[in-house]
Image (tube, rainbow, N blue to C red):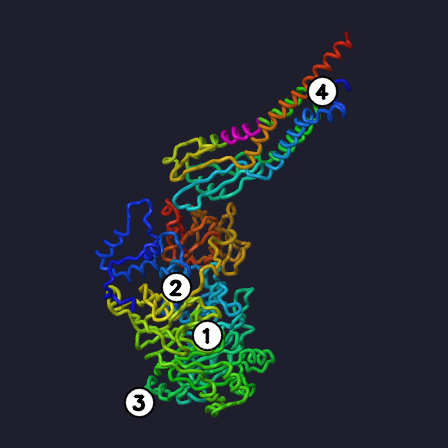
Amino acid sequence: MIQSRTSHKRFTLSAAILAACGLAAPAGAQSMRDVESVAKERGLTTADLVAAAKTYLPSGQKDEYLMFASSGHAGQVFVIGLPSMRLLRSIAVFTPEPWQGWGFGVGNEILAEGFPSGKANLWGDTHHPALSETAGDYDGQFLFINDKINARVAVIDLRDWETKQIVKNPLTLSDHGGTFVTPNTEYIIEGGQYAVPWGSDYAPISEYKEKYKGSVTLWKFDRDRGRIDKERSFAIELPPYWQDLSDAGKLASDGYFFMNSLNTELATGGIQDKKPPFEAGASMNATDFLHIIDWRKAERIYEAGKVEMIKGFPVITLKTALDEGLLHVTPEPRSPHGVDVAPKGDFIVVSGKLDPHVTIYSMSKIKSAIANKTYSGTDEFGVPILDFDSVVESRIEVGLGPLHTQFGPDGYAYTSLYLDSAVARWTMGGSYGSATPEPDWTLVQKTPVHYNVGHIAVAEGDTVSPDGKYLVSLNKWSVDRFYPTGPLLPQNLQLLDIGSQGTEMPVIYDSPMGVGEPHYAQIVKADKLDPWTTYPQVGWDPHVQNIEPMAPKPKMERVQRNDDGSVDIYMTAIRSHFNPEHIYLKQGDKVRWHITNTERAVDATHGFAVPMYNITASLEPGETVTIEFEADTSGTFPFYCSEFCSALHLEMMGYLMVEPN
Amino acid sequence: MRSLIARFMGPRVSRDEVSRHSIRYGTPGFLLLVARVLLLVSLFLPYWHMELQAPQYPDGLHMTAYLNALTGDVAEIDGLNHYIGMRSLYEAASIERTVGVFVMIAFVVMLELAATIHTRWTALLVAPVVLFPVVFLLDLHLWMRHFGLNLDPNAPLSNAVKPFVPTALGRGGIGQFVTIATPGAGLILAGVASVVLILALYFHRRAYLPLVKRQHDESSHASA
């Protein structure tokens, strides 16, 4: 394999590297001999130099792809450029983030939308980002992300890369099966995970089968408003099987979505009572169930009003779902993780963590099995089980611990192998087969990764038109790859070059992530996005994506004491001063502090920080924010611009003087 | 009165004469027409550009002056200028920008008139238009000088930056900025118009001076 470090071709540098390096010695003194001497000094192989040439971006050059990655416990979204693998930004979502002022003056009301039962939940476990799609392809407009631990979904606007909405699922408390979008982003699918009684009400676990519920929620997306429309969203009740990852059908499978499940045993654990723990109880059966759900039919049923209101939310009950024939299951290898729909929508690939195969289902076979009622029985909830042999297209032994599959443009599919710590490349059959030199449905190559890969992401690899080219392996363990950072080690995101056919598939970059655990990522061609570099106009409220008529304007700065005793402060910020600079308040005043950054220059961001009041805001050019608080602490508080906005940045300050009662 | 106007307008040329010597009589009128078109077109084109280059502005800052407007990164430049205490550029040459278009229209009318006059008075009507580009640059220079030399002594950087005269054309510098001032397409057209007008005056003189002289001679004969 090319990435082998024992390569003896050390300094036989080809002209190709020269070209790839962009080092075609200009008038300057550098030559390839310098590259050789650096390589010798640093012990780099030819393969290393090629990898460097493929990933290095000179200053000022921009990445070709953007990877939107979840961040796990960081509760945010990380945006990483490819092929450089440089972290470009984090986007604050479920967790307060001081640099962006998120939760400290900016976005407080959006965070508050996501507090189940009103209690502050200030972190999230983000898992599966989903870019908005048009006709099954990324359109670069919005990004959705779930919070697995609290069953919340957030909407991020990709014009300003800011979170606009957080919705809390009223029925369930975990949503590993989110977020996935239907091909035109009609719905954002949020699969519930650990079964709980509706709304997480109390019920002893002995009543698991009767009271504990599985569910999937279809959040309607209103693209014009850039918001989830809660009034047009609904859920479907499912057996308490711990529904897991999902994927929406497309093209051949348009109108369906697919969900794995991992506890069809209905295990209830109880290790303390010497009962099989969940890990054993939920892994007992040789197969679990792949759920096949006809969401267009579900939509019609919801629109016809055949729903039950549960916790104030419309739910198509399991009985209705079965009566209407919108839910089928079929066996799948046990403890599955990923279910991934092929680019043309004709195949659905499932990997069972404890089965060395990927199982490929055929959509046309599924459709005819549904039509002909080719059932092998029903489960204990009455859900019809499609006969496994009638719907399976192929099974390929790829290795141990297969988790997730992504697709290339050329008939290859890629599956992560957690236990093998490898990424497998295998060939598709059917209409994809002729694109590859190898026979259909065969394992082609396994590239070791370091270590314990979870998800993988191929450039646009879950769309109708994958780009291939790059694959990122999101490894859970880094063990010995980086300098030991104490006992808590970073994750390792490895970049693989999948641009060639056959067995060539080398790792070309290691990127440590010492800020959270990215689970899944989507990689989009950068030119599909059209982000703003400043807000379109001065006085812009990012929350509504429009001009705020009451935004402070130059020459209209003032401190206004209202009849109800509250105080409105209208302030502008421009290099290098706030106006006004002296603010007198009385202890106990209810304050609305409005600030507009009146700058029009790119990157002329100002901060606004007030000590002792837990306030900080980031004001990007043109942005206006309103910070509400009670001036409960008397004293003298120098507020300041917390961004190094200009040479006189430290002078960009003022005094808040709160007079004691 | 009529004779006064006739003397002002100069000798008339018969249609036959014009068609016999179409080049001689046509050239000045044609050139005056060209100048009018050039000036009218220049109304819609920038007269002056200034680019400010600095490390933190990789694309530079750009300011463009039209006869009636100031566009580009003026707000940003103003924002920077406040550090050295320079007044807002929007306050500069506001009268000029208000009347600029009307002056240009007046020029066009004057040239229209100049084409019908066949005496030395034509030169009087044409001369201001010829001088216009120079006057424009002189005015620009005086404003720059005025702004540059009258900096607010209470500005943040008043100790670091002493009053200076920004360059109206060519390269200059202030702080980390390099300034590059260049004439715009409108000003160039106005300059071309000036040259055309000088040529027009020459051909005008060549065509009509003999007629004026003859008329003069005839009238002195008649009075004699």
**Badges 1 and 4, same chain:** no
**Relative to the observer, which residue lies in front, A310 or B2?**
B2
2 or 1: mark nearer the eye? 1
- Residue A267's label in the rendered image is none
User: Badge 4: few (under 14), some or many (20 or more) residues near its Cα, within 10 Å?
Assistant: some
Comes first in the chain, label 3 or label 2 = 2
Span of residues in magenta = B131-142
Q: Amino acid at mark 1?
A: Tyr
**Percent position of residue A19, x then y:** 35, 54
Task: Please give the chain letter of the residue carrying mark 3.
Answer: A
Please give left or right for residue B115 compared with residue B90 in the image. Answer: right
**Badges 2 and 1, same chain:** yes
Query: Mark 3 highlights which residue?
Result: A273
Quadrant of the snapshot with the N terminus of chain A: bottom left
Q: Secondary structure at mark 3?
A: helix
Q: Are marks 3 and 4 in contact (CB under 8 Å)?
A: no
3 or 2: mark nearer the eye? 2
**Badges 2 and 4, same chain:** no
Q: CA distance from mark 1 to mark 3?
A: 52 Å
Quadrant of the snapshot with the C terminus of chain A: bottom left
Q: Are marks 1 and 3 in contact (CB under 8 Å)?
A: no
Task: Please give the chain letter of the residue carrying mark 1.
Answer: A
Q: Amino acid at mark 2?
A: Phe
Q: Secondary structure at mark 4?
A: helix
Query: Mark 4 highlights which residue?
Result: B8
**Percent position of residue B44, x then y:** 59, 39
1 or 4: mark nearer the eye? 1
Q: Secondary structure at mark 2?
A: strand
2 or 4: mark nearer the eye? 4
Query: Mark 1 highlights which residue?
Result: A432
Q: Amino acid at mark 4?
A: Phe
Query: Mark 2 highlights which residue?
Result: A78
